[in-house]
């Protein structure tokens, strides 16, 4: 089969189209890297959600809770290890940053397991109830975060090694954004390898297409779904931690704020498609940065406009998943 | 008398508010091919899906190899050695032919001898081995759906309308494959509208009408009784003969 490259070509096309509008090549590179970093962080948060929807038709508006919890847990660990974060040694920075990220993933993954059992499981196959119950779950989680961490926003300082920018001539590339790009690409590579090169990945791809037939072949798709839900929640936690450090502040509303972008990305990509989610996230990140630079007043609506344009072109998203 | 491999007693199935099966009763003897016939809407597909646990029986007993499976989940039913080929084929379009068969072989990588046998019957699958299944033609998809059910030995095959829309050459290959399976390791329960195909292959027959089994018996006797055929299947079946 011919691979569908057209949606993928939208990314360089968008970047090239923005170059004459931005004018300065240095600003264009900075904006492009910022867009890619933002897009890849959103991809990390969204990848699990698109798979859980594809596998079990579950609309989980509570996904933002895992993002927020990841951000708060990582913030707590980084604040507790403050001296290491501020040390000049890269190794001490890493000794604080990595445990913070791992703790965020572990707690968000664990919360995902409880969330799936208590909130999602009773409403399988009932979309309206899923929306109501998971949105309720997000609101409750937000309030619980305020109870545990207090209502004030937490200010974060990036580790010393990730502060500032790398200068190449006139071009300045923020170190943290570069890290976000590397982490996002690593997550995409890991997901792509798992989905395309392992039996469990085959099962997930088949389950997204036709869960009933996977069951008829003798596989328990419920267990698979719980596993994907937990991994997706852990990735949301990772994305939340990265996003918190990107903004250098964490508030209880962080999940609710980002979840809108996450949904735009998975709709643009085609519900259930990890590849589509990846392309959609990069398009959203780049658009937000270019428009934010060129016409800040319309930046807020730019992603909605992008989604509308994509859906006019491909109503099922960039990479629609073949269904039943 | 030996116990049948599959036995349905008083099976009732509701889909939403609709009562589809009203007490289905028939046996599938081990080691042969039983044809499940009937007009459109008689409840044949619902019967197969109920056996497979894809729709839950509201009442009645489904015994497979002496065990009541009516309350088991679909994966557990499949793991008892029952394979299912739905009418829609339900191949995984985004997966390659190879990946479809790898997934269907639960116990490990597909056995090469077994694959070679499948390829002698369904040569196109070998040709398009690495192609996404969504790119296959309708007939090739049907071959893949059947191949997926037989890539490993299974005790019972439930096959829903295998010849629907197929070219005669492919039907001939399918007949040959089903013959080898029923003469060897498997028992088959096949839903079919094509009476010519059913008559060639069936050892026994169960004919459904309005959610019940209206007739059971040997295929040879049923094929010889044109009055009964007309009464239970209608004239429409003649067009397939």
Image: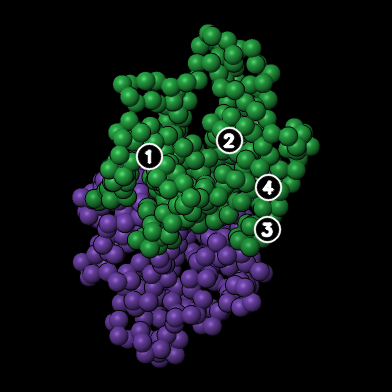
Dot label at residue A138? 4
Q: Earlier in the sequence, mark 3 or mark 4?
A: 3
Residue at mark 1: chain? A
Dot label at residue A240? 2
Residue A255's image quarter? Answer: top right
Q: Earlier in the sequence, mark 1 or mark 4?
A: 4
Which residue lies under the disc numbered 3? A132
Q: Position of residue B161 (x, y in %)?
A: 38, 69
Q: Earlier in the sequence, mark 1 or mark 3?
A: 3
SS assignment at label 4: helix
Q: Earlier in the sequence, mark 2 or mark 4?
A: 4
User: 10 Å neighbourhood of mark 4: few (<14), some, or many (≥20)?
Assistant: many
Real-space Cα separation, disc 3 to disc 4, in angstroms:
10 Å
Q: Where A279 falls versus A320 (above or below)?
A: above
Residue at mark 3: chain? A
Real-space Cα separation, disc 2 to disc 4, in angstroms:
14 Å
**Colour in which chain B is drawn:** purple
Q: Is residue A63 left or right of residue A309?
A: right
Dot label at residue A70? none
Whether tag 3 and tag 4 are in contact, CB under 8 A, the answer is: no
**Colour in which chain A is drawn:** green
User: 10 Å neighbourhood of mark 3: few (<14), some, or many (≥20)?
Assistant: some
SS assignment at label 1: helix
Q: Position of residue B180 (x, y in %)?
A: 32, 57
Q: Earlier in the sequence, mark 1 or mark 2?
A: 1
Front-lying residue, A211 or A256: A256
Marks 2, 3: nearer the viewer: 2
Which residue lies under the disc numbered 1? A196
């Amino acid at each position: 089969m011919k691979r569908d490259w057209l949606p993928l070509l939208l990314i360089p096309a968008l970047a090239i189209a923005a170059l004459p509008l931005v004018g300065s090549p240095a600003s264009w590179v900075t904006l492009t890297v910022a867009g890619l970093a933002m897009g890849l962080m959103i991809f990390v948060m969204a990848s699990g959600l698109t798979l859980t929807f594809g596998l079990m038709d579950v609309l989980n508006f509570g996904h933002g809770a895992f993002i927020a919890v990841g951000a708060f847990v990582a913030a707590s660990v980084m604040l507790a290890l403050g001296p290491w974060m501020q040390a000049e040694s890269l190794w001490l920075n890493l000794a604080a940053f990595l445990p913070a990220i791992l703790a965020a993933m572990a707690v968000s993954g664990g919360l995902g397991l409880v969330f799936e059992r208590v909130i999602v499981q009773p409403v399988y196959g009932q979309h309206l109830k899923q929306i109501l119950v998971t949105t309720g779950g997000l609101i409750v989680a937000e309030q619980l975060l305020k109870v545990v961490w207090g209502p004030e926003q937490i200010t974060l300082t990036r580790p010393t090694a990730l502060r500032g920018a790398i200068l190449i001539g006139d071009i300045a590339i923020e170190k943290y954004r570069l890290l976000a790009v590397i982490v996002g690409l690593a997550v995409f590579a890991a997901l792509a390898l798992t989905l395309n090169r392992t039996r469990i990945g085959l099962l997930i791809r088949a389950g997204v297409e036709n869960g009933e037939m996977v069951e008829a072949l003798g596989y328990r798709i419920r267990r698979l779904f719980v596993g994907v839900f937990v991994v997706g929640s852990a990735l949301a936690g990772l994305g939340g931690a990265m996003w918190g450090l990107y903004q250098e502040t964490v508030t209880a509303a962080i999940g609710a704020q980002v979840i809108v972008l996450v949904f735009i990305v998975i709709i643009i990509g085609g519900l259930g498609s990890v590849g589509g989610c990846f392309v959609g996230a990069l398009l959203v990140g780049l658009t937000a940065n270019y428009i934010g630079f060129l016409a800040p007043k319309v930046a807020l609506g730019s992603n909605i406009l992008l989604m509308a344009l994509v859906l006019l072109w491909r109503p099922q998203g960039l990479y629609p998943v073949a269904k039943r | 008398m030996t116990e049948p491999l599959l036995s349905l007693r008083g099976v009732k199935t509701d889909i939403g508010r609709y009562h589809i099966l009203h007490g289905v009763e028939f046996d599938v003897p081990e080691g042969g091919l039983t044809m499940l016939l009937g007009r459109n809407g008689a409840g044949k597909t619902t019967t197969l899906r109920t056996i497979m646990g894809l729709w839950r029986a509201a009442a009645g007993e489904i015994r497979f190899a002496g065990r009541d499976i009516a309350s088991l989940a679909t994966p557990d039913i499949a793991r008892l050695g029952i394979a299912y080929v739905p009418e829609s084929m339900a191949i995984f379009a985004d997966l390659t032919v190879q990946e479809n068969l790898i997934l269907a072989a639960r116990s490990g990588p597909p056995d090469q001898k077994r694959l070679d046998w499948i390829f002698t019957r369904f040569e196109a699958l070998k040709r398009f081995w690495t192609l996404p299944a969504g790119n296959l033609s309708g007939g090739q998809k049907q071959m893949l759906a059947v191949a997926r059910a037989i890539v490993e030995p299974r005790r019972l095959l439930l096959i829903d309308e295998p010849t629907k829309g197929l070219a005669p050459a492919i039907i001939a290959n399918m007949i040959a494959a089903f013959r080898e399976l029923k003469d060897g390791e498997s028992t088959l329960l096949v839903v079919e509208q094509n009476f010519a195909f059913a008559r060639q292959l069936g050892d026994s027959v169960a004919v459904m009408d309005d959610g019940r089994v209206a007739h059971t018996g040997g295929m040879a006797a049923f094929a010889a009784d044109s009055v009964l055929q007309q009464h239970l299947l209608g004239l429409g079946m003649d067009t397939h003969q």
